Amino acid sequence: MNKSKLWTKDFIIMSVSTFFGGLTFYLLITTLTVYAVDEFHASQSMAGLVSSIFVVGALVSRLFAGKYIEIIGRKRMLYGGLFLFLFVMFLYFIVENMNVLLFIRFIHGAAFGVFTTAVATVIMDIIPNERRGEGISYFSLSVTLAMAVGPFLGLYLSQQGSFTMIFGFCTLFSLISTIIMLFVHIPESDITKEQLGAMKGFKLKDFFEIKAVPISIVIAIMGFAYSGILSFITSYAKEIDLIDSASFFFIVYAVFILISRPFTGRLLDKKGDNIVMYPALILFVIGLVALSQANHGFTLLLAGALIGLGYGTMNSCCQAIAVKESPRHRVGLATSTFYIFMDSGVGLGPFLLGFIIPIVGFRGLYLTLAVVVFASILLYYVLHGKNKHTENNILKAS
Protein backbone atom coordinates (compact mmCIF):
# COMPACT_ATOMS: atom_id res chain seq x y z
CA MET A 1 0.00 0.00 0.00
CA ASN A 2 2.84 2.36 0.90
CA LYS A 3 4.39 1.74 -2.51
CA SER A 4 1.54 3.56 -4.29
CA LYS A 5 1.56 6.61 -2.01
CA LEU A 6 1.63 9.75 -4.15
CA TRP A 7 1.47 12.73 -1.78
CA THR A 8 4.84 12.28 -0.11
CA LYS A 9 6.84 15.11 1.49
CA ASP A 10 9.29 15.11 -1.45
CA PHE A 11 6.49 15.22 -4.06
CA ILE A 12 4.83 18.21 -2.33
CA ILE A 13 8.08 20.17 -1.82
CA MET A 14 9.22 19.66 -5.44
CA SER A 15 5.81 20.74 -6.72
CA VAL A 16 5.88 23.91 -4.57
CA SER A 17 9.50 24.67 -5.57
CA THR A 18 8.58 24.31 -9.26
CA PHE A 19 5.62 26.67 -8.73
CA PHE A 20 7.87 29.43 -7.35
CA GLY A 21 10.44 28.90 -10.12
CA GLY A 22 7.68 29.03 -12.74
CA LEU A 23 6.18 32.11 -11.05
CA THR A 24 9.52 33.91 -11.51
CA PHE A 25 9.62 32.91 -15.20
CA TYR A 26 6.05 33.97 -16.06
CA LEU A 27 6.19 37.18 -14.01
CA LEU A 28 9.34 38.29 -15.83
CA ILE A 29 8.20 37.23 -19.30
CA THR A 30 5.13 39.47 -19.03
CA THR A 31 7.00 42.54 -17.73
CA LEU A 32 10.47 42.55 -19.32
CA THR A 33 9.32 43.58 -22.80
CA VAL A 34 7.94 46.81 -21.25
CA TYR A 35 11.14 47.13 -19.16
CA ALA A 36 13.33 46.89 -22.28
CA VAL A 37 11.30 49.58 -24.08
CA ASP A 38 11.07 51.93 -21.08
CA GLU A 39 14.61 51.60 -19.74
CA PHE A 40 16.67 51.05 -22.91
CA HIS A 41 14.32 52.43 -25.62
CA ALA A 42 14.39 49.06 -27.37
CA SER A 43 12.36 48.40 -30.51
CA GLN A 44 9.39 45.97 -30.29
CA SER A 45 11.39 43.24 -32.04
CA MET A 46 14.33 43.65 -29.61
CA ALA A 47 11.92 43.69 -26.66
CA GLY A 48 10.40 40.46 -27.99
CA LEU A 49 13.89 38.97 -28.15
CA VAL A 50 14.28 39.61 -24.40
CA SER A 51 11.42 37.13 -23.86
CA SER A 52 12.32 34.56 -26.51
CA ILE A 53 16.06 34.34 -25.71
CA PHE A 54 15.10 32.92 -22.29
CA VAL A 55 13.37 30.03 -24.10
CA VAL A 56 16.43 29.59 -26.35
CA GLY A 57 18.65 29.29 -23.26
CA ALA A 58 16.27 26.71 -21.76
CA LEU A 59 16.23 24.74 -25.03
CA VAL A 60 20.03 24.59 -25.28
CA SER A 61 20.48 23.52 -21.65
CA ARG A 62 17.73 20.88 -21.83
CA LEU A 63 19.43 19.30 -24.81
CA PHE A 64 22.46 18.57 -22.63
CA ALA A 65 20.69 18.22 -19.26
CA GLY A 66 18.68 15.22 -20.44
CA LYS A 67 21.78 13.54 -21.82
CA TYR A 68 24.11 14.13 -18.86
CA ILE A 69 21.75 14.05 -15.86
CA GLU A 70 22.52 10.40 -15.00
CA ILE A 71 26.24 10.89 -15.72
CA ILE A 72 26.67 14.07 -13.62
CA GLY A 73 24.10 12.96 -11.04
CA ARG A 74 20.58 14.21 -10.41
CA LYS A 75 21.39 15.95 -7.12
CA ARG A 76 24.33 17.94 -8.54
CA MET A 77 22.37 18.97 -11.63
CA LEU A 78 19.26 19.94 -9.68
CA TYR A 79 21.07 22.10 -7.13
CA GLY A 80 23.47 23.48 -9.76
CA GLY A 81 20.52 24.68 -11.86
CA LEU A 82 18.66 26.07 -8.83
CA PHE A 83 21.58 28.04 -7.39
CA LEU A 84 22.48 29.45 -10.82
CA PHE A 85 18.82 30.46 -11.32
CA LEU A 86 18.90 32.32 -7.98
CA PHE A 87 22.32 33.92 -8.61
CA VAL A 88 21.33 35.27 -12.05
CA MET A 89 18.20 36.82 -10.52
CA PHE A 90 20.43 39.21 -8.52
CA LEU A 91 22.09 40.39 -11.77
CA TYR A 92 18.85 42.02 -13.00
CA PHE A 93 19.39 44.79 -10.43
CA ILE A 94 22.64 45.94 -12.09
CA VAL A 95 21.74 45.70 -15.81
CA GLU A 96 23.09 48.73 -17.70
CA ASN A 97 22.33 47.99 -21.36
CA MET A 98 20.38 45.72 -23.72
CA ASN A 99 23.32 43.41 -24.51
CA VAL A 100 23.86 42.63 -20.82
CA LEU A 101 20.11 42.07 -20.37
CA LEU A 102 20.03 39.63 -23.30
CA PHE A 103 23.04 37.73 -21.91
CA ILE A 104 21.43 37.50 -18.45
CA ARG A 105 18.16 36.29 -19.97
CA PHE A 106 19.97 33.54 -21.93
CA ILE A 107 21.85 32.29 -18.81
CA HIS A 108 18.68 32.57 -16.70
CA GLY A 109 16.82 30.47 -19.27
CA ALA A 110 19.63 27.89 -19.32
CA ALA A 111 19.51 27.59 -15.52
CA PHE A 112 15.71 27.23 -15.65
CA GLY A 113 16.07 24.46 -18.27
CA VAL A 114 18.54 22.51 -16.13
CA PHE A 115 16.50 22.94 -12.93
CA THR A 116 13.12 21.96 -14.45
CA THR A 117 14.53 18.98 -16.39
CA ALA A 118 16.19 17.65 -13.22
CA VAL A 119 13.06 18.16 -11.07
CA ALA A 120 10.80 16.50 -13.64
CA THR A 121 13.18 13.53 -13.94
CA VAL A 122 13.26 13.00 -10.15
CA ILE A 123 9.48 13.41 -9.90
CA MET A 124 8.98 10.66 -12.52
CA ASP A 125 11.06 8.34 -10.36
CA ILE A 126 9.19 8.93 -7.11
CA ILE A 127 5.68 8.68 -8.61
CA PRO A 128 4.35 5.09 -8.37
CA ASN A 129 4.14 3.47 -11.83
CA GLU A 130 0.45 2.65 -11.50
CA ARG A 131 -0.34 6.32 -10.69
CA ARG A 132 1.99 7.99 -13.19
CA GLY A 133 -0.72 9.81 -15.20
CA GLU A 134 -2.38 11.05 -12.01
CA GLY A 135 0.95 12.06 -10.44
CA ILE A 136 2.14 14.02 -13.47
CA SER A 137 -1.28 15.71 -13.70
CA TYR A 138 -0.97 16.97 -10.13
CA PHE A 139 2.72 17.91 -10.44
CA SER A 140 2.18 19.90 -13.66
CA LEU A 141 -0.46 21.95 -11.84
CA SER A 142 2.47 23.80 -10.25
CA VAL A 143 3.41 25.16 -13.70
CA THR A 144 -0.23 25.76 -14.65
CA LEU A 145 -0.84 27.85 -11.52
CA ALA A 146 2.40 29.78 -12.10
CA MET A 147 1.24 30.44 -15.68
CA ALA A 148 -1.98 31.97 -14.35
CA VAL A 149 -0.69 33.83 -11.26
CA GLY A 150 2.58 35.10 -12.85
CA PRO A 151 1.08 37.25 -15.64
CA PHE A 152 -1.71 38.45 -13.32
CA LEU A 153 0.84 39.48 -10.65
CA GLY A 154 3.16 40.96 -13.29
CA LEU A 155 0.36 43.18 -14.63
CA TYR A 156 -0.55 44.33 -11.11
CA LEU A 157 3.06 45.06 -10.01
CA SER A 158 3.91 46.91 -13.25
CA GLN A 159 0.91 49.22 -12.65
CA GLN A 160 1.38 49.70 -8.89
CA GLY A 161 5.17 49.54 -8.40
CA SER A 162 8.59 49.80 -10.03
CA PHE A 163 10.73 47.31 -11.96
CA THR A 164 13.04 47.13 -8.91
CA MET A 165 10.04 45.89 -6.91
CA ILE A 166 9.31 43.27 -9.60
CA PHE A 167 12.93 42.03 -9.47
CA GLY A 168 12.69 41.99 -5.66
CA PHE A 169 9.61 39.75 -5.71
CA CYS A 170 11.18 37.44 -8.29
CA THR A 171 14.35 37.15 -6.19
CA LEU A 172 12.21 36.25 -3.16
CA PHE A 173 10.34 33.58 -5.17
CA SER A 174 13.65 32.13 -6.43
CA LEU A 175 15.03 32.08 -2.88
CA ILE A 176 11.95 30.21 -1.59
CA SER A 177 12.21 27.74 -4.49
CA THR A 178 15.87 27.04 -3.63
CA ILE A 179 15.60 26.86 0.17
CA ILE A 180 12.67 24.44 0.35
CA MET A 181 14.37 22.11 -2.17
CA LEU A 182 17.18 21.58 0.37
CA PHE A 183 14.75 19.46 2.42
CA VAL A 184 14.14 16.93 -0.38
CA HIS A 185 15.69 13.48 -0.70
CA ILE A 186 16.84 13.11 -4.30
CA PRO A 187 17.19 9.47 -5.41
CA GLU A 188 19.86 8.72 -7.98
CA SER A 189 19.01 6.47 -10.92
CA ASP A 190 19.54 2.74 -10.48
CA ILE A 191 21.22 2.02 -13.82
CA THR A 192 23.99 -0.37 -14.87
CA LYS A 193 27.49 0.58 -16.05
CA GLU A 194 26.55 -0.64 -19.54
CA GLN A 195 23.49 1.64 -19.65
CA LEU A 196 25.56 4.55 -18.33
CA GLY A 197 28.26 3.92 -20.94
CA ALA A 198 25.67 3.79 -23.71
CA MET A 199 24.49 7.30 -22.74
CA LYS A 200 27.95 8.87 -23.21
CA GLY A 201 27.94 8.78 -27.01
CA PHE A 202 27.31 11.62 -29.45
CA LYS A 203 24.66 10.09 -31.72
CA LEU A 204 21.20 11.62 -32.09
CA LYS A 205 19.72 8.96 -29.78
CA ASP A 206 22.12 10.13 -27.04
CA PHE A 207 20.42 13.56 -26.97
CA PHE A 208 16.81 12.46 -27.61
CA GLU A 209 14.72 9.52 -26.43
CA ILE A 210 13.40 8.15 -29.76
CA LYS A 211 10.34 6.50 -28.16
CA ALA A 212 9.27 9.86 -26.70
CA VAL A 213 9.54 11.69 -30.04
CA PRO A 214 6.11 10.79 -31.58
CA ILE A 215 4.03 12.22 -28.71
CA SER A 216 6.52 15.11 -28.37
CA ILE A 217 5.79 16.10 -32.00
CA VAL A 218 2.10 16.36 -31.04
CA ILE A 219 2.84 18.60 -28.03
CA ALA A 220 5.15 20.78 -30.16
CA ILE A 221 2.22 21.58 -32.48
CA MET A 222 -0.10 22.13 -29.49
CA GLY A 223 2.51 24.47 -27.94
CA PHE A 224 2.76 26.31 -31.27
CA ALA A 225 -1.03 26.84 -31.25
CA TYR A 226 -1.06 27.85 -27.57
CA SER A 227 1.73 30.40 -28.13
CA GLY A 228 -0.71 32.36 -30.30
CA ILE A 229 -2.84 32.82 -27.17
CA LEU A 230 0.06 33.54 -24.79
CA SER A 231 1.61 36.17 -27.05
CA PHE A 232 -1.36 37.89 -28.71
CA ILE A 233 -4.37 37.59 -26.38
CA THR A 234 -3.75 41.08 -24.91
CA SER A 235 -3.46 42.74 -28.34
CA TYR A 236 -6.55 40.87 -29.55
CA ALA A 237 -8.52 41.86 -26.43
CA LYS A 238 -7.62 45.52 -26.99
CA GLU A 239 -8.79 45.30 -30.60
CA ILE A 240 -12.19 43.85 -29.64
CA ASP A 241 -12.47 46.05 -26.50
CA LEU A 242 -12.48 43.17 -23.97
CA ILE A 243 -9.27 44.00 -22.08
CA ASP A 244 -10.94 43.74 -18.62
CA SER A 245 -12.21 40.23 -19.36
CA ALA A 246 -8.85 39.23 -20.85
CA SER A 247 -7.09 39.93 -17.53
CA PHE A 248 -9.05 36.97 -16.07
CA PHE A 249 -8.50 34.66 -19.09
CA PHE A 250 -5.57 32.74 -17.55
CA ILE A 251 -7.25 32.60 -14.13
CA VAL A 252 -10.27 30.84 -15.69
CA TYR A 253 -7.86 28.67 -17.71
CA ALA A 254 -6.12 27.58 -14.48
CA VAL A 255 -9.35 27.04 -12.51
CA PHE A 256 -10.71 24.61 -15.10
CA ILE A 257 -7.43 22.71 -15.17
CA LEU A 258 -7.59 22.49 -11.37
CA ILE A 259 -11.12 21.08 -11.60
CA SER A 260 -10.30 18.53 -14.31
CA ARG A 261 -6.84 17.27 -13.25
CA PRO A 262 -7.94 14.78 -10.54
CA PHE A 263 -10.13 12.99 -13.12
CA THR A 264 -8.00 13.16 -16.28
CA GLY A 265 -4.86 11.75 -14.64
CA ARG A 266 -6.70 8.77 -13.16
CA LEU A 267 -8.57 8.21 -16.41
CA LEU A 268 -5.26 8.05 -18.29
CA ASP A 269 -3.91 5.44 -15.86
CA LYS A 270 -7.04 3.28 -15.82
CA LYS A 271 -8.55 3.58 -19.31
CA GLY A 272 -5.56 4.45 -21.50
CA ASP A 273 -4.28 7.43 -23.48
CA ASN A 274 -6.90 7.78 -26.23
CA ILE A 275 -9.91 8.26 -23.94
CA VAL A 276 -8.27 11.45 -22.62
CA MET A 277 -6.38 12.72 -25.69
CA TYR A 278 -9.16 12.72 -28.30
CA PRO A 279 -11.68 14.74 -26.19
CA ALA A 280 -8.86 17.13 -25.15
CA LEU A 281 -7.92 17.76 -28.81
CA ILE A 282 -11.57 18.44 -29.72
CA LEU A 283 -12.05 20.80 -26.73
CA PHE A 284 -8.91 22.74 -27.75
CA VAL A 285 -10.35 23.15 -31.28
CA ILE A 286 -13.73 24.36 -29.94
CA GLY A 287 -11.92 26.74 -27.54
CA LEU A 288 -9.91 28.31 -30.37
CA VAL A 289 -13.05 28.72 -32.51
CA ALA A 290 -14.87 30.35 -29.55
CA LEU A 291 -11.89 32.67 -29.02
CA SER A 292 -11.89 33.70 -32.69
CA GLN A 293 -15.59 34.64 -32.50
CA ALA A 294 -15.53 36.41 -29.09
CA ASN A 295 -17.62 39.59 -28.94
CA HIS A 296 -18.51 39.40 -25.24
CA GLY A 297 -16.49 38.82 -22.09
CA PHE A 298 -18.42 35.60 -21.39
CA THR A 299 -17.38 34.09 -24.75
CA LEU A 300 -13.73 35.04 -24.14
CA LEU A 301 -13.71 33.43 -20.70
CA LEU A 302 -15.61 30.37 -22.01
CA ALA A 303 -12.80 29.98 -24.54
CA GLY A 304 -10.32 30.12 -21.63
CA ALA A 305 -12.20 27.31 -19.85
CA LEU A 306 -12.33 25.11 -22.99
CA ILE A 307 -8.66 25.71 -23.79
CA GLY A 308 -7.78 24.84 -20.18
CA LEU A 309 -9.68 21.55 -20.50
CA GLY A 310 -8.10 20.95 -23.92
CA TYR A 311 -4.49 22.14 -24.05
CA GLY A 312 -4.07 22.05 -20.26
CA THR A 313 -5.11 18.39 -20.14
CA MET A 314 -2.95 17.42 -23.12
CA ASN A 315 0.14 19.01 -21.65
CA SER A 316 0.31 16.71 -18.62
CA CYS A 317 -1.01 13.66 -20.50
CA CYS A 318 1.59 13.93 -23.28
CA GLN A 319 4.34 14.18 -20.67
CA ALA A 320 3.03 11.04 -18.94
CA ILE A 321 2.89 9.23 -22.31
CA ALA A 322 6.46 10.31 -23.23
CA VAL A 323 7.81 8.83 -19.98
CA LYS A 324 5.59 5.73 -20.11
CA GLU A 325 6.79 4.85 -23.63
CA SER A 326 10.49 5.14 -22.72
CA PRO A 327 12.90 2.77 -20.90
CA ARG A 328 13.20 3.53 -17.16
CA HIS A 329 16.92 4.36 -17.29
CA ARG A 330 16.22 6.99 -20.01
CA VAL A 331 13.50 8.87 -18.11
CA GLY A 332 15.73 11.98 -17.96
CA LEU A 333 16.17 11.94 -21.73
CA ALA A 334 12.45 11.33 -22.29
CA THR A 335 11.64 14.31 -20.05
CA SER A 336 14.09 16.64 -21.80
CA THR A 337 12.88 15.43 -25.23
CA PHE A 338 9.29 16.33 -24.26
CA TYR A 339 10.29 19.79 -23.00
CA ILE A 340 12.56 20.52 -26.00
CA PHE A 341 9.73 19.86 -28.44
CA MET A 342 7.16 21.76 -26.36
CA ASP A 343 9.48 24.76 -25.86
CA SER A 344 10.30 24.79 -29.58
CA GLY A 345 6.59 25.07 -30.40
CA VAL A 346 5.95 27.77 -27.80
CA GLY A 347 9.20 29.62 -28.65
CA LEU A 348 8.94 29.60 -32.45
CA GLY A 349 5.17 30.19 -32.48
CA PRO A 350 5.07 33.96 -31.79
CA PHE A 351 7.79 34.66 -34.37
CA LEU A 352 6.11 32.66 -37.16
CA LEU A 353 2.54 33.64 -36.29
CA GLY A 354 3.60 37.29 -36.38
CA PHE A 355 3.81 36.97 -40.17
CA ILE A 356 0.24 35.61 -40.41
CA ILE A 357 -1.53 38.29 -38.33
CA PRO A 358 -1.14 41.15 -40.88
CA ILE A 359 -2.75 38.90 -43.52
CA VAL A 360 -5.68 37.30 -41.62
CA GLY A 361 -6.02 39.42 -38.44
CA PHE A 362 -6.40 38.07 -34.90
CA ARG A 363 -9.75 36.35 -35.50
CA GLY A 364 -8.31 34.69 -38.60
CA LEU A 365 -5.23 33.65 -36.61
CA TYR A 366 -7.26 31.73 -34.00
CA LEU A 367 -9.44 30.12 -36.69
CA THR A 368 -6.28 29.04 -38.53
CA LEU A 369 -4.88 27.56 -35.31
CA ALA A 370 -8.18 25.72 -34.75
CA VAL A 371 -7.73 24.09 -38.19
CA VAL A 372 -4.12 23.16 -37.31
CA VAL A 373 -5.20 21.51 -34.03
CA PHE A 374 -8.09 19.74 -35.77
CA ALA A 375 -5.65 18.30 -38.35
CA SER A 376 -3.49 17.14 -35.43
CA ILE A 377 -6.22 14.67 -34.40
CA LEU A 378 -5.25 12.58 -37.44
CA LEU A 379 -1.55 13.17 -36.69
CA TYR A 380 -2.03 11.92 -33.11
CA TYR A 381 -3.81 8.82 -34.42
CA VAL A 382 -0.95 8.04 -36.84
CA LEU A 383 1.88 8.74 -34.37
CA HIS A 384 0.43 7.20 -31.21
CA GLY A 385 -3.35 6.67 -31.04
CA LYS A 386 -3.63 3.71 -33.42
CA ASN A 387 -0.96 1.79 -31.46
CA LYS A 388 -2.93 2.23 -28.24
CA HIS A 389 -6.12 1.09 -30.00
CA THR A 390 -4.36 -2.07 -31.19
CA GLU A 391 -2.93 -2.74 -27.72
CA ASN A 392 -6.37 -2.38 -26.13
CA ASN A 393 -7.87 -4.88 -28.60
CA ILE A 394 -5.09 -7.38 -27.85
CA LEU A 395 -5.64 -6.98 -24.09
CA LYS A 396 -9.43 -7.50 -24.50
CA ALA A 397 -8.84 -10.59 -26.64
CA SER A 398 -6.51 -12.10 -24.07
Image: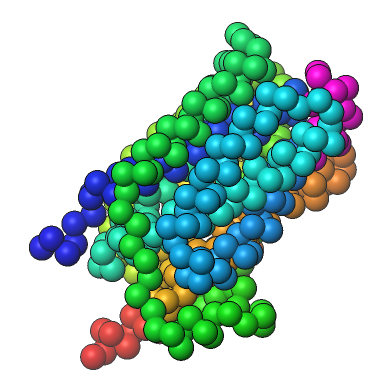
Q: Position of residue 321 (x, y in %)?
A: 44, 67
Residue farthest to the left, as pictured? 1
> Seen in the image, is 24 located left or right of residue 101?
left
Front-lying residue, 355 or 32:
32
At horizontal 55% and vertical 75% (from top left) the residue drawn is 209
Q: Can residue 256 be seen in this view?
A: no
Q: Please name the residue shown 30% across and 61% down the image.
A: 126
Image side of residue 258 versus residue 165, left or right: left
Q: Is residue 157 above or below residue 280?
A: above
Instruction: Tell me residue 30's x, y (percent).
Output: 65, 29
Q: Which of 154 and 133 is in front in this view?
A: 154
Question: Is residue 342 visible to the viewer in this orientation of the structure?
Answer: yes
Quadrant location of the N terminus in the rendered image: bottom left
Q: Nearer the viewer, residue 255 or 84?
A: 84
Q: Which residue lies furthest to the top in this view?
A: 160
Q: How many marks?
A: 0
Q: Which colour scheme is used?
A: rainbow
Percent position of residue 318, x then y: 48, 62
Which residue does the image show at 72% across and 39% down from the upper left? 104
Compared across the picture, whether 348 is left or right of 307 comes to right
Determine the image quadrant of residue 292. Answer: top right
Residue 42 lies within the magenta run: yes
Screen quadrant of the C terminus:
bottom left
Residue 52 among those drawn in magenta: no
- Left or right? Give the position of 160 relative to 36: left
Most prominent secondary structure in the magenta stretch?
helix
Which range of residues does the magenta coloring cover? 36-49
Q: Is residue 133 above or below residue 212?
A: above
